[in-house]
Amino acid sequence: MRLERLLPGCAIVEVGTVAALLERAQVQAAGFDLVLLDFFLPDGEPVETVAAVRRALPETPIVLMSGSASAAEVQRAIGAGLRGFLPKTMPSELFAMAISMVLAGGTYVPAEALQGAGAEAARVPADPPSRVPGDRLTPRERQVLVQLASGASNKEIGRDLQLAEVTVKLHVRQILRKINARNRSEAAAIAARAGMI
C-alpha cells in the first residue's frame, strides 16, 4: 500500500516466499524493475536470499526492508548484492526517495543501519586509512557528509546548512571524489567507520 501511494501507476507483484519469487522470476519474461524483500521471509535466510535473487535476476536491484537487522547482517547482504536497506520505521518521504534512488541506479543504506555491528563488525574489512574522510575534507564538507550520512536529501541539507541545493550537490560530488566513495551510501558507511557520525 505504501508503494502504491508513493509511486502511483507502479505494478506490484506480491509473493509470500523466496521459492515463489524465484519461480515468478523464471516466468516473468519482462523481469522486474525492483525486488523489495522482507528481511524475515519464512523460507530463506536474508543473505542467501539476496544471493539467490541476484543469480535469478542479475539486472534487478534488490532492496531489503526490516524492523530489526544488525549492522553485520546488513553489511553481509550488501556484499551479496543488496542495493538498498530500508528500515520499516523510515518516514514516507525518505522511503520514496530511497526507492527512487535505487531505481535510478544508486544504493541506499541509512548510516544507522551500518552502526553498532559489535564484535561481528571485526569480520568486515575496514577501509584503508587513505579513505578516512576527516583529514581530506573541508569543515563545510564534513558538515555535509554528516547530514548526508543521516539520510538527508540535498534539499534538506541545504535547508539545515543554509546552502543552495546546487551548492550541496557540488559538495557531495567533492566528498565522493575525495574519499573514493561510489555513492552516498558508501560515503555514509565510510563516515560511520571513521567515527564521524
Image: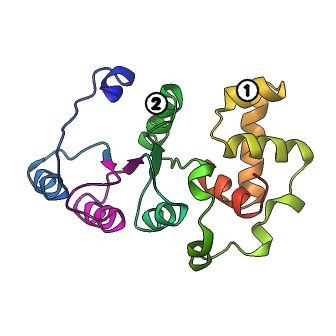
**Rendered position, 33 above or below 53:** above
Is the image coloured rainbow, by chain, by secondary structure, or in one colour? rainbow
Magenta span covers which residues? 37-66
Query: Which residue is located at x 26 percent, y 54 percent?
Result: 41
Q: Give percent across and percent down for residue 90.
A: 51, 35
Kindly tell me whether residue 6 is visible in this rendering. yes
Q: Neighbour class for label 2 at 10 Å: few (<14), some, many (≥20)? A: some
Is 117 left, or right, of 134 in this rendering? left
Foreground residue, 139 or 174? 139
- The Cα atoms of the two marked residues, 2 and 1, are separated by 19 Å
Which residue is disc 2 drawn over? 96
- Front in this rendered view, residue 133 or 64: 64
Residue 183 visible, this angle: no
Q: How many marks?
A: 2
Quarter of the image with the N terminus in it: top left
Q: Give the crowd class for mark 1: few <14, some 14-19, many >=20 residues within 10 Å.
A: some
| Circle 1: residue type | Glu
Q: Secondary structure at mark 2?
A: helix
| 32 left or right of 85 in image | left
Residue 42's place in the image compared with 141, above or below, is below
Task: Give yes or no for contact between labels 2 and 1 (Cβ–Cβ under 8 Å).
Answer: no
- Does the stretch in magenta take in 56? yes
Which residue is identified by label 1?
A: 165
Q: Amino acid at mark 2?
A: Ala
Query: Which is nearer the eye, 34 or 74?
Result: 74
Indicate left or right for 91 with 99 as reference.
right
Mark positioned earlier in the residue sequence (2 or 1): 2
Q: Give residue 63's position: percent from left, percent from top.
A: 39, 49
Please state the horizontal and vertical placement of residue 192, each as a whole percent of the image. Answer: 70, 58
Left or right: where 155 falls relative to 6:
right
